[in-house]
Amino acid sequence: MTQTVFVLNGPNLNLLGLREPEVYGAETLADIERRVAARAKTLGLDVDFRQSNVEGVLIDWIHEARTKATGVIINPGAYTHTSVALHDAVKAVDVPTIEVHLSNIHARESFRHHSYLSPAAKGVIVGFGSMGYELALEGLASLIGRA
């Protein structure tokens, strides 16, 4: 039976490829989704790839993961630095979660150095660009016994 991983993307990630390519790269979110889906297939996993600019929608998807996913990969975007609600949602569900950031948030502006989500996540991957999603998938596969 194939297991499903939710890949959740927060605000402004729908603009990848256009928004600050010197920071976030030239790939679009659709490009990343295709690569992650291909890698997931080799691991015997399905991915459900989603993006929203709305914090409450991301929270609803995390809640949904409780019964429909074996793991979550999340790039919370700017909500990383502001959302106690995302932290609480991840803590409330018993689903391993990996936090991903395209850029190294610790090498950027000081307000980006703190993540409210990191203490609730099983792992955090920063600074590897879009490859971070695939690294997160590998890590999650290991956590759920698929690697």
Image (cartoon, rainbow, N blue to C red):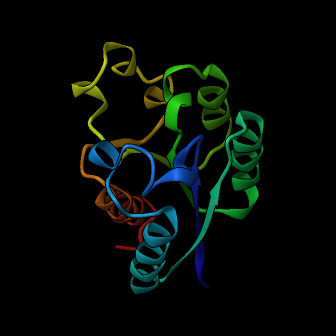
Residue drawn at x 44%, y 26% as measured from the top left: 119
Residue drawn at x 44%, y 71% as measured from the top left: 31
Q: Is residue 56 above or below residue 65?
A: above
Q: Is residue 73 above or below residue 146?
A: above
- Give 125 or 82, whichever is nearer the viewer: 82
State the image coordinates of residue 117 (x, y, percent, origin top left).
50, 29
State the image coordinates of residue 84 (x, y, percent, origin top left).
61, 20
In the rendered image, the residue lying farthest to the top is 110
Residue drawn at x 61%, y 37% as measured from the top left: 90
Residue drawn at x 46%, y 63% as measured from the top left: 28
- Give 39 or 104, whichever is nearer the viewer: 104
- Give 33 or 19, whichever is nearer the viewer: 19
Q: Is residue 52 above or below residue 92?
A: below
- Give 79 or 70, whichever is nearer the viewer: 79
State the image coordinates of residue 79 (x, y, percent, origin top left).
56, 29
Q: Quadrant of the C terminus?
A: bottom left
- Answer with left or right where residue 25 lies relative to residue 41: left
State the image coordinates of residue 107 (x, y, percent, origin top left).
21, 27
Q: Quadrant of the N terminus?
A: bottom right
- Answer with left or right where residue 23 lies relative to residue 93: left
